[in-house]
Image (cartoon, grey):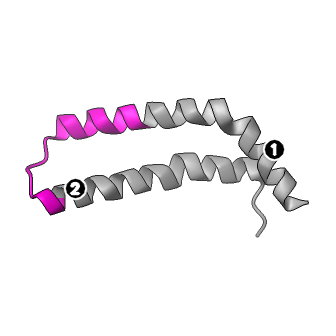
């Protein structure tokens, strides 16, 4: 199955990055054994998604162009 470059970028920014963030957040709480304040979790997650979205819209053309060059 071949994935289009724009789908690859969206997959990276909206699936892989949030999963990596969630995994690191869970590891932080397991390692330091702190209680989870879910308001903080929601705030941090929301700010992370906003930052990822901003980065996506700023860099998407460059990333798509780089991916197309690599395909050739």
Measure how far apart labels 1 and 2 are at the Cα level: 36 Å
Q: Residues within 10 Å of mark 2 (few under 14, many from 20)?
A: few
Residue 33 sits in quarter = bottom left
Q: Position of residue 55 (x, y in %)?
A: 57, 34
Report the span colored magenta.
30-48
In the rendered view of the protein, which quadrant contains the C terminus? bottom right
| Residue 16 belongs to magenta span | no
Q: Label 2 belongs to which residue?
A: 28
Left or right of 41 on screen, residue 68 = right
Q: Label 1 belongs to which residue?
A: 65
Tag 1's secondary structure? helix
Relative to 57, say whether 36 is above or below.
Answer: below
Relative to 58, say whether 23 is above or below.
Answer: below
Tag 2's secondary structure? helix
Residue 30 sits in quarter = bottom left
Q: Position of residue 11 (x, y in %)?
A: 60, 52
Considering the whole magenta stretch, tell me its main secondary structure: helix
Query: Number of marks in the image?
Result: 2
In the rendered view of the protein, which quadrant contains the N terminus? bottom right
Q: Nearer the viewer, residue 61 or 4?
A: 61
Q: Position of residue 65 (x, y in %)?
A: 81, 44
Q: Residues within 10 Å of mark 1 (few under 14, many from 20)?
A: few
Residue at far bottom of view: 1
Residue 43 disc label: none
Left or right of 23 on screen, residue 2 = right
Q: Residue at x 78, y 48 (%)?
A: 66
Q: Position of residue 24 (x, y in %)?
A: 32, 56
């Amino acid at each position: 199955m071949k994935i289009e470059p724009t789908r690859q970028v969206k997959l990276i920014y909206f699936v892989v990055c949030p999963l990596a963030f969630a995994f690191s957040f869970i590891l932080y709480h397991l390692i330091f054994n702190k209680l989870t304040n879910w308001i903080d979790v929601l705030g941090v997650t929301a700010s992370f998604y906003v930052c990822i979205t901003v980065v996506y819209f700023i860099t998407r053309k460059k990333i798509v162009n780089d991916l197309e060059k690599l395909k050739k």
